[in-house]
Image (cartoon, rainbow, N blue to C red):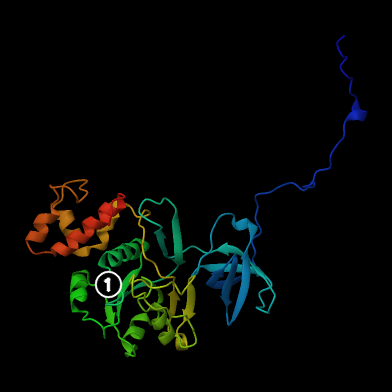
Amino acid sequence: MARRARDYDEDDVRVRPSRRGSRPRTRIRPAHEDAVEGFVVAVDRGRYRCLVEDRTVTAMRARELGRKGVVVGDRVALVGDVSGRPDTLARIVRVEPRGSTLRRTADDTDPFERIIVANADQLAIVTALADPEPRPRLIDRQLVAAYDAGMHPLLVLTKADLADPDALLAEYASLGVPAFVTQRGGDLAGLRDLLRGQITVLVGHSGVGKSTLVNALVPDAERAVSHVNAVTGRGRHTSSSALALELPDGEGWIIDTPGVRSFGLAHVRPENVINAFEDLAEGAAERCPPHCDHLQSECGLDSWVADGHASQGRLDSLRRLLRSREGEAD
């Protein structure tokens, strides 16, 4: 015998109270007209150290920022407790438009790009002349990243007491990149002149002496210094995150970054890579056929180099970089 379906009435209906309340949702965000301006100098596990006037304020991201990230160098708007007292926490409610963004990817096939720092004027590529040996291909990649970010590049060669810098300087002379050569205990007055009035990011392979430079430029920085492994020739990462430090007498800022062993350029459009090679870009415009990828036999850059307008080493470097953008070995 079929079971008779139960008849339900309003007494059987249980109305569950809404947990979100009855307040209607709105897309109108608060203006935060009372927000104060801050400059992000460090990021550590979801907490942001911001310079506000003459004090450091610890802050967290406000929910209204959504997925927008905050990095060292960002100029932000802060609300809440901005006194800077211990155990206080402000909120970052707005990230101001960035003037520049230095980016990299894990490798050339990685679609996820990472912003290293924001609003920097200059990229100082720190390279040791020995111990570890210089890596011109890594320098080239960092040059491309600088031009792509709209930053001025600067080449800083360390450990000149161990090797002659002339060959490496000659390789980049045609690009017109400013360079400074230093050695252990050397005078850094010339480097300070190049950093004055700028926000400069320091990047480089582990063990090239970047932290030693930072400690010399900012005596109270106390950045840990590593040694190069005698077997592998590699340095150990001593800086675990980016840190902005003001130069003495307010002459500018330097941003120390963790040592890198690779610099992916998946975020850079291949047609823009050649713009970092000014000695070759002119030849590409004059002699290359439309849509030339600079890797085929009909590329006009070969004749440009043969006529003495640029070096074969620069063209080889460009082509290695373009091939690596396609996932091939560097």
Q: Residue at x 26, y 59 (%)?
A: 275
- Residue at position x 89%, y 23% from top? 8
Residue found at the very far front of the displayed protein: 231
x then y, percent, for residue 48: 58, 69
Residue 56, x across and y down, in percent: 59, 78
Residue at figure coordinates x 39%, y 67% from the top left: 260
Nearer to us in this view, 3 or 172: 3
Left or right relative to 117: residue 232: left
On screen, 225 above or below 97?
below
Q: Nearer the viewer, residue 220 or 289?
A: 220
Circle 1 packing at 10 Å, graded few (<14), some (14-19), many (20+), is some
Residue ID for mark 1:
134
Q: Residue at x 27, y 72 (%)?
A: 134
Q: Position of residue 126 (x, y in %)?
A: 34, 75
Task: State the image coordinates of residue 221 (x, y, percent, origin top left).
Answer: 49, 83
Quarter of the image with the C terminus is bottom left
